[in-house]
Image (spheres, rainbow, N blue to C red):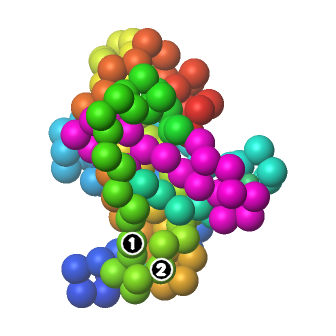
Amino acid sequence: MALTKKGEFWYGTTSGDTQAELRSYSIANRHEAVRFAASKCDCGCRTFALQSDEEAGVAIRTCTDCGQEHLMGNSADYMDGAAPETHECVCENEVFELVSGVAVHEGTHKVRWYYIACHCVECNLVGVFADWPCEAPDAAAFLAKV
Ligand SMILES: [Zn+2]
Ligand SMILES: [Zn+2]
């Protein structure tokens, strides 16, 4: 696996590439992501449309196969007043594979920051499309819901 840079964007092919980009973004943000999970619909599909509202702390993924909408992580707690917007790649595609990552409070399992990285299924762009400071009691339980 390897990330390659074209212009200002990074491109990859595997979920490992997406995770690597998420990790380097999180280090630059000074809250390093230490645990990761790839999104998978109940139907088995791994490609989604993504909407988010970073101010509210909300992300919604919609399965491209069965159409199921899922509130990622603890988004359900913050839906009141949220105005999620659809993400579009620089190539105008709106279908992505998603990898989530969390930073934790040092020495604990408590979530400190949430990152969502996307891999465009059309042009292979990878990047963190949404992130916000996030408090949740257990990183594993949180990542089980992405
Ligand atoms: Zn599905
Ligand atoms: Zn693209």
Q: Amino acid at mark 1?
A: Glu
Q: Quadrant of residue 82?
A: top left
Number of disc labels: 2
Q: Above or below — where is 79 with respect to 119? A: above
Could you tell me which secondary element the residue under label 2 belongs to? loop
Q: Secondary structure at mark 1?
A: loop
Label located before the other in sequence (2 or 1): 1
Residues 14 and 76: in front is: 76
Q: Nearer the viewer, residue 107 or 116?
A: 116
Q: Nearer the viewer, residue 98 or 4?
A: 98
Residue 55 shown left or right of residue 109 in the figure = left
Q: Quadrant of the C terminus?
A: top right
Q: Which residue lies at the image location 54% right of the left edge and 51% below the top edge?
A: 61
Label disc, if present, on residue 67 of the rendered structure? none
| 106, above or below 22, in the image | above
Q: Label 2 sits on what residue type?
A: Asn
Point out residue 102 in the picture as x, y percentages from the top left corner.
40, 35
- Asked if disc 2 and disc 1 are in contact, CB closer than 8 Å, the reply is yes
Mark 1 CB within 8 Å of ligand 2: no
Measured from the top left, where is residue 41 in percent x and y? 71, 49
Q: CA distance from mark 2 to mark 1?
A: 6 Å
Q: Which residue is mark 2?
A: 93
Q: Is residue 57 magenta?
A: yes
Does ligand 2 reach within 8 Å of label 2's beta carbon?
yes
The residue tagged 1 is: 88
Residue at the spot 42% in from the left edge and 54% down from the top edge: 51
Kindly tell me whether residue 4 is visible in this rendering: no
